[in-house]
Image (cartoon, helix red, strand yellow):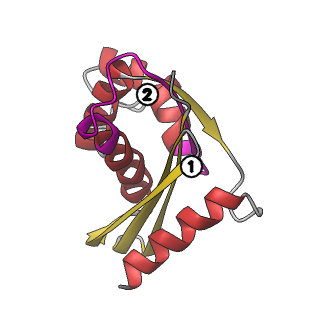
Amino acid sequence: MQNIEIYTDGACSGNPGKGGWGAVILIDGKEERLSGAELLTTNNRMELSAALFALEKLQKKGIVKGTTMQLTSDSQYLKNGITTWIQSWKKNGWKTANKQPVKNKDLWEALDALNAFFSIEWKWVKGHAGHHYNEICDELARKAMDG
C-alpha cells in the first residue's frame, strides 16, 4: 500500500486579485511539486484549487478509487468546508445557513467528487508557523502568483 501525503496552500494579492496556489505530493516519500496562478481570483479559490489540482493529478497518475491519503492545508475554510459544511450545503440546495448561494460551488463540487473517490484524511496546520511542507507550498503559490 502506498503512503500518500498532500500539502497545499493558496495566496492572493488583493482579494480579489492575482492569485497562486502550490501543492506538494509525496508518494512513498517521493516528492512532486505543483503550482498555478489566476489573474483575478480570491484567496479561498486558490486554497481550494491547490487541493483540487493535487487530487486530480493523483487520479491522472492512476491512483485507484478508495486509496487512503492525507491532505494537509493551512486553510480552515478548505478543511471545514469539505469535512463538515458541505453536507448542509448539499442538503440545502447549495445555500449557506444564511440562505445565500455557496461561494466557489464549482470547486466544492469537484472536490466533493474527488473526496468520494479517494479516502482522504483532511488535516489543518497553522500557516506561517515553520511547517516544512506548508512553507514550501506557500513559496510555490507566491512564485506562481508573481510569475
Between marks 2 and 1 in the image, the one whose residue lies nearer the viewer: 1
Q: Which residues are magenta?
A: 57-77
Left or right, 61 with reference to 22? left
Residue farthest to the bottom? 147
Q: Residue at x 43, y 28 (%)?
A: 97
In this view, the residue in front, 102 or 69, is 69
Q: Which residue is mark 1?
A: 75
Q: Quadrant of residue 87?
A: top left
Please name the residue shown 37% across and 71% down the image: 19
Please name the residue that numbered disc 2 is placed on.
97
Q: Is residue 15 above or below residue 99?
A: below
* Quarter of the figure with the C terminus: bottom left
Q: Is residue 35 visible?
A: yes
Residue 59 x, y percent position in the rendering: 28, 34
Graded by Cα atoms within 10 Å as few (under 14), some (14 to 19) or many (20 or more), the crowding at tag 2 reads: few
Q: CA distance from mark 2 to mark 1?
A: 20 Å
Instruction: Give the secondary structure at mark 1.
Output: loop
Does 73 appear in magenta?
Answer: yes
x then y, percent, for residue 118: 39, 23
Which of the numbered marks, if any, corresponds to residue 39? none
- Please say if 141 is above or below 29: below
The residue sitting at 70% across, 60% down in the picture is 132
Q: Tell whether 111 sits left or right of 106.
A: right
Q: Amino acid at mark 2?
A: Ala
Q: Is residue 3 left or right of residue 35?
A: right
Q: Position of residue 124 (x, y in %)?
A: 65, 41
Q: Nearer the viewer, residue 53 or 58?
A: 58
Based on the picture, tell me whether residue 17 belongs to the magenta stretch.
no
Q: Nearer the viewer, residue 65 or 96?
A: 65
**Which quadrant of the figure has residue 80?**
top right
